[in-house]
């Protein structure tokens, strides 16, 4: 086994290793643990962190080891037991004390975490009472049941679907469009390349490794982010990353990372990198385009054959239109911090041989986040290699195994989201009172703050609905949304929030009714192995019975819908296992060529492996014949200039990509005198968003004095009198938090990182209260990317930092509610 692979296997692989790394099991004494090492039964399951086998003994999960086919398991498997046996589990149905007592939907004390325990019947009666009240007193516009998120794996128990199907049998409600992941990217790219690109299968890694001379890993950290996947993750991409590492060492492929920090992928590959100032990539790209244009190094044939609107763009590039500024490398250097000569050198390298650009998603999670993706497509067009193996641009190779060839196996379907054809809900009112029934996903707090406000979104007018009630399942808005204090203020206008979760998250704390779901490990299910590779099928065996009073989402919603006599419509009269079997049999039928065995055989085996797929090149068909295989853009060509967007008349997203200054920016940008540090809230290395933060022993492996790490450069730390391991206060005009300093050379001056998903733990419910654990969304801005996508702009955020002084408050994030 190579060293690098051993690195991935750290603490895993060999049987029993998982337990030894994190210490003895949480729940059994160590002597019992030792005696039990070979006892019990092994069951198969899967998760966002990969497929695994778990040893169950004495009714408890004792040990977890990766499935044999997973050659690069993530150490996050070590955190799974801590999710099941977390002190932060939701144990019983709970209702917020003042909401129950005052009956006036009083929101004054919302967030004080004081709850009373009720029975399941009481809780579901209250839930039903509220649904009735909203439909009768207001209408469908007053209910928002549209937020979705990273519900655990398993197609039968996909909890977003369960909640929305049940609510759908009662009445209509407000829904969302877009997501937090790629909101800006998925909106701009259909105008430019004819599809969202972000979730599309990409050119196979085999072809990239074979054909690329240069790979630009742009704002992307695949070694970190490929640890998790949307279905059961296979980690097959790591095989290619390992090969790439060898090719970098042998100088067969030149890899350059363009990133404000030295990320995990760069550390792993040992490749070159360009430090770009945060949020300034578009300026850098314009400097590159200027060089290619002036030095006539761009592919004019490709531009003529496959693109539209290059001329308008070059007028902007040459300073003949718009701001009348020529986008020379010297101009770009002042903004992006990369010297002009380096920009020229980089531009020439891009057209020297075959170049594959691989974008991550973080740079579109910022103000004007549409621009870097559009400009990236323009650069790729100028290089002229779109549709060639190992050339062109990808917007997804860091995600869920995109780039691992597909076997063509079609994954099993989910529990149906929508109510069945021919059925209608109890309340058939579809009058939204002039409000929009669909909102851009990240604008829901604006609805609470400014109901009735009209905004632009993707060429349409949206009137923000005035919702009074929300239902949340399988997502954690008090993690995923920006600007906690703004949320606190806005939540005064919400009458009722029902949350269904297994973990007592900050969203539960700010809810009125909390229902205990069980985890995926407490129910039977089925899921695909490999979201894009179609590698196999995993039987997700129930490991243990639902803990405490928790129930499956399926059972919860069955009991809810029974309150208006629609439970049979909801379940179609089938049980959990009947549904699992149906999803399998439907899948078997849809994949006839794969000759799937009978259900019993699959269930007993636990896993079916379909092997590897055939390599494939993205956009090869378009390159071959742009008429027959036209893109989905209005013209069928790559739109460097979009007349459609131009016609919208937006200020922050115009007819071609442009550089826009940000509302706040470090490194000399607006606001940087007062708050000199850029806060990047990247995706966590040792969590899936907020999931697994509740896993106590695993959290202890990275927390600093029990707080979330805050990464900072040694020079900055020294200037601020901060030492590694100190507690720090990070703050701006929006909020403040306590975190634990990790001083690291991997971060340049002026950049700090606190990973998203750290559990919010406000000292009290008041607006402005310090967050005691370190949730970066205490500090981020809640502003849209632009009028086009209205997407989250979490990474447009600047802050200051100091050593924490005074009495240190305890962390309030974990351990559930104050039970009264
Ligand atoms: N500052 C900043 N903020 C960000 C981001 C960022 O980069 N920076 N990234 C954004 C992105 S890309 C995303 S995708 C979002 C993620 O936002 P979310 O998807 O909201 O994040 P998760 O922490 O995965 O929340 C899932 C919740 O569902 C619960 N859950 C899981 N499975 C089940 C189930 O089967 N039943 C029930 N009832 N509940 C379940 C979990 O316990 C957890 O509380 O965050 C966004 N927020
Ligand atoms: N371990 C783990 N993996 C995950 C997830 C998780 O929670 N944990 N979440 C999954 C989900 S839902 C998503 S959406 C994806 C997210 O995928 P991404 O959004 O791509 O991931 P991030 O880690 O936030 O950022 C990737 C890189 O972008 C760089 N970056 C940030 N801002 C800029 C900039 O202005 N310019 C440049 N050039 N670089 C910049 C960061 O330094 C970082 O190295 O990850 C998925 N994978
Ligand atoms: Mo995401």
Image (cartoon, rainbow, N blue to C red):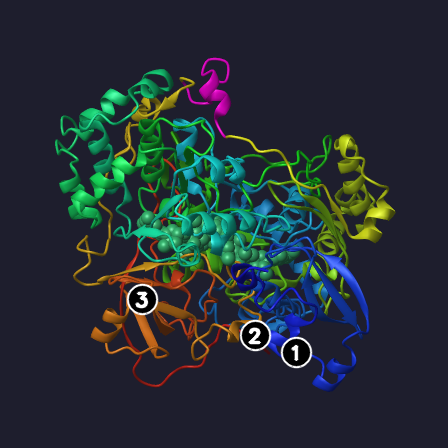
Q: Quadrant of the C terminus?
A: bottom right
Which is more toward the observer, 237 or 603? 237
* Label of residue 696 in the image: 2
* Label of residue 745 in the image: 3
Mark 2 element type = helix
Which is more toward the observer, 348 or 387? 348
- Residue drawn at (21%, 62%), measured in percent from left and top? 676
Q: Residues within 10 Å of mark 2 (few under 14, many from 20)?
A: many
Residue range in magenta is: 618-634
Distance between the alpha carbons at the discs numbered 1 and 2? 9 Å
- Residue drawn at (62%, 79%), measured in percent from left and top? 23
Residue wearing tag 1: 26
Answer whether residue 632 is magenta in the image. Answer: yes
Q: Which comes sooner in the sequence, label 3 or label 2? A: 2
Distance between the alpha carbons at the discs numbered 1 and 3? 35 Å
Is residue 725 toward the left or the right of residue 98 in the image? Answer: left
Residue 714: % across, % down: 27, 71
């Amino acid at each position: 086994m190579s060293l690098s692979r051993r690195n991935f296997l750290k603490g895993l692989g060999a049987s029993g290793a998982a337990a030894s790394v994190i210490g003895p099991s949480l729940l059994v004494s160590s002597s019992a643990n030792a005696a039990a090492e070979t006892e019990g039964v092994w069951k198969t399951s899967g998760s966002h962190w990969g497929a695994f086998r778990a040893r169950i003994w004495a009714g408890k999960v004792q040990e977890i080891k990766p499935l044999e086919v997973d050659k690069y398991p993530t150490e996050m498997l070590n955190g799974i037991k801590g999710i099941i046996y977390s002190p932060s589990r939701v144990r019983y149905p709970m209702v917020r004390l003042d909401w129950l007592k005052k009956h006036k939907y009083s929101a004054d004390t919302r967030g004080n975490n004081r709850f009373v325990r009720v029975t399941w019947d009481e809780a579901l009666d209250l839930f039903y009472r509220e649904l009735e009240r909203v439909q009768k007193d207001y209408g469908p516009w007053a209910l928002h049941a549209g937020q979705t998120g990273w519900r655990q794996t398993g197609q039968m128990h996909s909890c977003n679907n369960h909640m929305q199907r049940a609510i759908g049998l009662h009445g209509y409600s407000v829904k969302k469009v877009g997501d937090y992941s790629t909101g800006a990217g998925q909106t701009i790219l259909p105008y430019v390349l004819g599809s969202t690109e972000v979730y599309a299968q990409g050119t196979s890694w085999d072809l990239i490794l074979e054909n690329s001379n240069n790979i630009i890993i742009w704002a992307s950290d695949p070694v970190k982010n490929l640890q998790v996947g949307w279905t059961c993750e296979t980690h097959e991409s790591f095989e290619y990353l390992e090969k790439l590492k060898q090719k970098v060492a042998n100088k067969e492929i030149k890899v350059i990372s363009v990133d404000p920090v030295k990320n995990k992928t760069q550390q792993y590959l040992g490749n070159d990198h360009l430090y770009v100032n945060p949020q300034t990539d578009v300026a850098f790209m314009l400097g590159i385009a200027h060089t290619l244009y002036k030095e006539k190094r761009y592919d004019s044939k490709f531009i003529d054959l496959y693109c539209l609107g290059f001329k308008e763009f070059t007028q902007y590039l040459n300073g003949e239109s718009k701001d009348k500024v020529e986008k020379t490398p010297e101009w770009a250097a002042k903004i992006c911090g990369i010297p002009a000569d380096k920009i020229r050198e980089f531009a020439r390298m891009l057209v020297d041989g075959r170049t594959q650009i691989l974008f991550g998603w973080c740079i579109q999670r910022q103000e004007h986040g549409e621009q870097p993706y559009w400009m990236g497509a323009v650069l790729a067009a100028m290089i002229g290699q779109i549709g060639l193996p190992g050339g062109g641009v990808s917007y997804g190779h860091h995600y869920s195994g995109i780039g691992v060839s597909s076997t063509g196996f079609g994954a099993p379907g989910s529990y149906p989201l929508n109510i069945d054809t021919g059925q209608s809900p109890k309340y058939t009112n579809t009058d939204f009172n002039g409000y929009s029934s669909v909102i851009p996903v990240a604008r829901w707090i604006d609805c609470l703050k400014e109901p009735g406000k009209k905004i632009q979104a993707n060429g349409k007018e949206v009137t923000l609905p005035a919702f009074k009630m929300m239902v949340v399942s399988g997502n954690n808005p008090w993690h995923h949304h920006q600007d906690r204090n703004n949320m606190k203020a806005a939540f005064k206008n919400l009458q009722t929030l029902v949350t269904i979760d297994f973990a007592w998250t900050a969203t539960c704390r700010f809810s009125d009714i909390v229902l205990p779901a069980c985890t995926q490990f407490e129910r039977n299910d089925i899921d695909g192995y490999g979201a894009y590779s179609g590698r196999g099928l995993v039987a997700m065996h129930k490991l243990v019975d639902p803990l405490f009073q928790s129930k499956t989402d399926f059972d919860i919603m069955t009991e809810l819908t029974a309150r208006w006599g629609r439970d049979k419509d909801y379940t179609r009269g089938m049980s959990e296992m009947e549904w699992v079997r149906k999803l399998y049999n439907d899948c078997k039928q849809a994949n006839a060529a794969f000759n799937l065995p009978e259900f019993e055989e699959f269930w007993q085996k636990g896993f079916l492996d379909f092997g590897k797929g055939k390599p494939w090149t993205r956009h090869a068909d378009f390159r071959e014949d742009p008429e027959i295989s036209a893109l989905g853009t209005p013209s069928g060509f790559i739109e460097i200039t979009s007349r459609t967007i131009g016609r919208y008349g937006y200020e922050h997203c115009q007819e071609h990509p442009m550089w826009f200054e940000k509302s706040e920016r470090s490194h000399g940008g607006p606001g940087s005198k007062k708050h000199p540090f850029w806060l990047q809230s990247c995706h966590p290395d040792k969590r899936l968003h907020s999931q697994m933060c509740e896993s106590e022993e695993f959290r202890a492996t990275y927390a600093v004095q029990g707080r979330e790490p805050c990464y900072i450069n040694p020079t900055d730390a020294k200037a601020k009198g901060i030492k590694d391991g100190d507690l720090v206060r990070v703050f701006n005009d929006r909020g403040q938090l306590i975190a634990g300093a990790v001083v690291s050379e991997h971060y340049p001056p002026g950049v700090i990182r606190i990973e998203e998903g750290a559990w919010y733990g406000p000292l009290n419910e008041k607006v402005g209260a310090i967050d005691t654990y370190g949730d970066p969304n205490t500090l981020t801005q809640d502003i849209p990317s632009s009028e086009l996508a209205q997407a989250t702009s979490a990474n447009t955020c600047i802050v200051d930092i100091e050593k924490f002084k005074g009495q240190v408050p305890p962390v309030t994030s974990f351990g559930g509610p104050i039970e009264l």
